[in-house]
Image: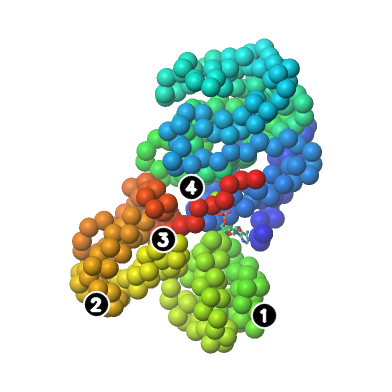
Amino acid sequence: MLERGAELTSLDRLLADAERAAGRVALIEGPPGIGKTRLLREVARRARDRGLGVLTARGSELERSFPYGIVHQLLDPVVRSGAPDDREDLMAGAAALAQPVFEPWPTAEAPGDPSFAILHGLYWLLANLAERGPLFIAIDDAQWSDRPSGRLLEFLAPRLEGMPIALAVASRDTGNVAEPDALSALARAPLQRIKLRPLSTAAVGGLVAARLGEQAGETLASACATATGGNPFLIHELLNDLARQQRATDDIDPATVERLGPREVAAAALARVGGLSGAPALTRALAVLGEDADLTAAAALAELDPGEASATADGLADAMILEAGRPLRSRTRSCAQRSTTRSRRGHEAIYTPERRSFERVAEPSRMP
Ligand SMILES: Nc1ncnc2c1ncn2[C@@H]1O[C@H](COP(=O)(O)OP(=O)(O)OP(=O)(O)O)[C@@H](O)[C@H]1O
Ligand SMILES: [Mg+2]
């Protein structure tokens, strides 16, 4: 993992603080593909090495309407796995208030905000667990947290001081999200913000050399950095593409690579994973034709038949690279309006702060 030394140092400190019962929260933020999951996994590994108990969970777009989804991921393994005595211990005292959450057929809670009693109970359940040893709680993709779990995070944040619990929450940038979400309250709580930056040209150069060989020169490396904006996910995608072409490195024209933007790299990834084989050609045609391009003209330039071009344009709209409808238009509205994601075909749209859209296609693997 490149260029995350400072972040790891401060997350190591978060773990050390938990060990001395000075619990607190770190919020790891950044656009899709910037490396939030990778960083969180590394911290979880370090926490295990230090002997902390590690609880992990991950928000998912499909499960965000499932109340306590994240709480269940975190706590079911401990609540359900132990011996009955063990469970009794965990549920002792005020933690018993959380019992309804773990009933096989929860009835006590209406959807919406959890009661104070439940939050209080869950807090005590975690406190009972932390009595056994310091804990690291890692929550990934928290932008898709279900609401009651989001409320628990918000409830916990100001109450961790004095507890041996480190909480790290990773979320896609929430800055301009218009709709109220489970995280907006957490973001106002006392926490340490860790904003992940794109990789430097030097780091991209290292990845290029590792993948394509040392003979790949600096010009190609800086072209790759430009084409991907230093986004590690897009760098890997671009390098996969270049490696797949099996061309000698001096045969790869840096100027051509540089002319690709994150949108084009993303469209290529989409073509591979989403079966939209015409996506790269259509995206390139639009780069030439400019905004409000006519579908027929774009199809002709992309050498696609009109039916395929139309289906591809719809797929790119689903992936939020293009606007829906005709004429063809890149999505250039504000981040706030573009924050919605669509799960159709499993694609998730992503946007850089520089108002360029690109696509995060691969379903990220679960946290360990
Ligand atoms: N610092 C880094 N150095 C090298 N490769 C990295 C780095 N960070 C992430 N990567 C790689 O980039 C890819 C994307 O990273 P990751 O899945 O962690 O992004 P993410 O921020 O979690 O994205 P998403 O918001 O879509 O979940 C992965 O293949 C990961 O291994
Ligand atoms: Mg991730």
On residue 66, the disc is none
Alpha carbon separation for disc pair 3 and 1: 32 Å
Q: Counting residues from the N terminus, which is met first, the one under dot 3 or under dot 4?
A: 4
Mark nearer the viewer, 2 or 4 = 2
Q: Secondary structure at mark 2?
A: helix
Q: Position of residue 94 (x, y in %)?
A: 63, 13
Q: Amino acid at mark 1?
A: Glu
**Residue at 66% in and 17% down:** 91
Mark nearer the viewer, 1 or 4 = 1
Q: Position of residue 35 (x, y in %)?
A: 58, 54
**Residue at 34% in and 70% down:** 278
Q: Amino acid at mark 3?
A: Gly
| Ligand 1 position by quadrant | bottom right
Q: Position of residue 46 (x, y in %)?
A: 74, 46
For disc 1, the marked residue is 214
Quarter location, residue 90: top right
Alpha carbon separation for disc pair 1 and 2: 40 Å
**Residue at 46% in and 57% down:** 360
Q: Secondary structure at mark 4?
A: loop
Q: Amino acid at mark 4?
A: Asp
**Ligand 1 contact, mark 2 (Cβ < 8 Å):** no
Q: Counting residues from the N terminus, which is met first, the one under dot 3 or under dot 1?
A: 1
For disc 2, the marked residue is 300
On residue 173, the disc is 4
Left or right of 247, for residue 359? left
Alpha carbon separation for disc pair 3 and 2: 22 Å
Q: Position of residue 288 (x, y in %)?
A: 30, 76
Q: Counting residues from the N terminus, which is met first, the one under dot 2 or under dot 4?
A: 4
Q: Amino acid at mark 2?
A: Ala
Q: Secondary structure at mark 1?
A: loop
On residue 274, the disc is 3
